[in-house]
Image (cartoon, rainbow, N blue to C red):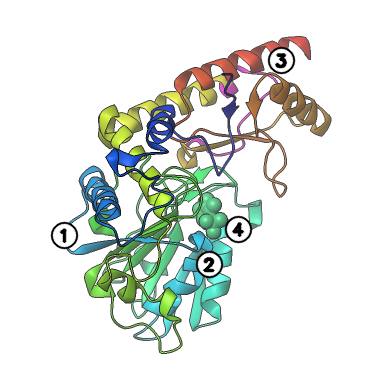
């Protein structure tokens, strides 16, 4: 079996151990005589799976008891509307930090439901850096401050958690979920799509402080109302059962790896291999300021579009797939989520060195 190294920004690689476990259990989950794909979401067996997934998520992320962990559908993009509907509920105002297309889409959606405002943006330089935000930029009457922690397309990450005082802080953590320890208590809500670092596509995880719930706008569709899902333990309707099961397997893998401290150490090693190479290379370089660099999504360029295309083509043929950068940024991007093994990055760097020597 030849597996490629998949550098896609999402859906992305899953840990081989989790895939193998799923394969072994595919036809008969723990003696139930059925696949998780087939079983009732109201069955005892599935109840064990979703409870285990939640328990592991709480343990690994150190999530306090006054937070709910919701397993939803609709992707991160549905939350762009659900967030204002559920939380823009006191003064009908919210402050947004615009660090890329995902943050901008969230802002545009919020504007449809209330008074949303951009308080900082890096749009002037194609979102290639993280704009500074201080407490003074924030409206103390805002119902919340919203930002995207890791900007998947541009390869930037907030090097600090913005200080918002008493204003609740909400973060899209889609592409850095479970990539390193996170102090959940600093946030009112964090959420993300699973397909980057948690599971296959189809699951969206929302972690929300309980006091935030219960004041959704009247117009909020039932399926967008977080309180409904919280009160029903994510079983108001049929949840993405198999994806939740995969999430459980990935969390077990993270635990076996030594938890988020160990995962972070591994992620730093992988990112360093690439960033160090860009320092020494005369052909490949990073365009992101050192302090704003993501550990998960690492864009790079040669400065020559034809050379970029040649590189992507030859890399693909060599088994390093999905390295083409986003259509809005050009160049290349290596997404190195948790499941990308260190050998994958080592081999990619070797390949880049060879390519540079051949094309100098
Ligand atoms: C991928 C991504 C999204 C969009 O996720 P969907 O699940 O496809 O809606 C939103 N925000 C960030 C940061 C992402 O990486």
Local packing at callout 2 (Cα closer than 10 Å; few below 14, some 14-19, many 20+) is many
Percent position (x, y) of residue 311? 74, 24
Mark 4 highlights which residue? 101
The numbered disc on residue 106 is: 2
Name which of mark 2 and mark 1 comes first in the sequence.
Answer: 1
Q: Nearer the viewer, mark 4 or mark 1?
A: 1
Asked if the residue at label 1 sits under 8 Å from ligand 1, the reply is no
Local packing at callout 3 (Cα closer than 10 Å; few below 14, some 14-19, many 20+) is some
What span is colored magenta in the figure? 278-290
The numbered disc on residue 65 is: 1
The image shows a total of numbered marks equal to 4
**Dot 2 and dot 1 residues touching (CB under 8 Å):** no
Q: In the rendered image, is residue 30 in sight? A: yes
Distance from the alpha carbon under mark 2 to that under mark 3: 40 Å
Name which of mark 3 and mark 1 comes first in the sequence.
Answer: 1
Q: Nearer the viewer, mark 2 or mark 3?
A: 2
Residue farthest to the bottom, as pictured: 218
Taking the magenta stretch, the answer to whether it contains residue 179 is no
Say which of 229 and 60 sits in front. Answer: 229
| Residue at screen point 36% across, 46% down | 245
Q: Nearer the viewer, mark 2 or mark 1?
A: 1
Asked if the residue at label 2 sits under 8 Å from ligand 1, the reply is yes
Distance from the alpha carbon under mark 4 to that under mark 3: 32 Å
Callout 1: helix, strand or loop?
Answer: loop
Mark 3 highlights which residue? 356
Which quadrant would the C terminus be assigned to in this image? top right
């Amino acid at each position: 079996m030849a597996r490629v190294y998949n550098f896609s920004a999402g859906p992305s690689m899953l840990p081989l151990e989790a895939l193998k476990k799923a394969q072994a259990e595919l036809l008969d989950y723990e003696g139930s005589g059925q696949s998780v794909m087939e079983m009732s979401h109201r069955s005892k067996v599935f109840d064990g799976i979703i409870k285990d997934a939640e328990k592991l998520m709480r343990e690994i992320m150190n999530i306090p008891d006054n937070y709910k962990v919701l397993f939803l559908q609709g992707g991160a993009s549905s939350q762009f509307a659900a967030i204002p509907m559920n939380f823009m509920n006191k003064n009908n105002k919210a402050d947004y930090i615009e660090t890329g297309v995902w943050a901008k889409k969230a802002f545009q959606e919020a504007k449809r439901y209330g008074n949303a405002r951009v308080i900082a943006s890096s749009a002037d330089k194609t979102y290639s850096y993280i704009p500074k935000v201080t407490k003074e930029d924030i409206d103390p009457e805002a119902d919340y401050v919203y930002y995207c922690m890791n900007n998947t397309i541009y390869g930037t990450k907030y090097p600090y958690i913005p200080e918002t005082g008493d204003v609740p802080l909400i973060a899209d953590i889609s592409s850095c979920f479970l990539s390193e320890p996170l102090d959940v208590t600093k946030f009112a809500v964090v959420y993300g799509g699973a397909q980057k670092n948690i599971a296959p596509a189809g699951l969206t995880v929302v972690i929300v402080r309980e006091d935030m719930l219960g004041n959704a706008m009247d117009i909020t569709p039932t399926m967008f109302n977080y309180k409904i899902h919280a009160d029903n333990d994510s079983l108001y309707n049929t949840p993405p059962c198999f994806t939740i099961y995969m999430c459980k397997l990935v969390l077990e893998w993270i635990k076996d790896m030594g938890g988020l401290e160990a995962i972070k150490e591994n992620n730093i090693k992988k990112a360093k291999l690439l960033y160090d190479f860009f320092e020494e290379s005369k052909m490949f370089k990073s365009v992101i300021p050192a302090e704003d660099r993501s550990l998960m999504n690492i864009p790079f360029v040669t400065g020559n579009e034809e050379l970029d295309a040649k590189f992507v083509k030859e890399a693909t043929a060599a088994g390093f797939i999905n390295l083409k950068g986003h259509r809005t940024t050009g160049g290349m991007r290596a997404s190195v989520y948790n499941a990308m093994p260190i050998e994958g990055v080592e081999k990619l760097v070797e390949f880049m060195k060879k390519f540079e020597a051949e094309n100098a």
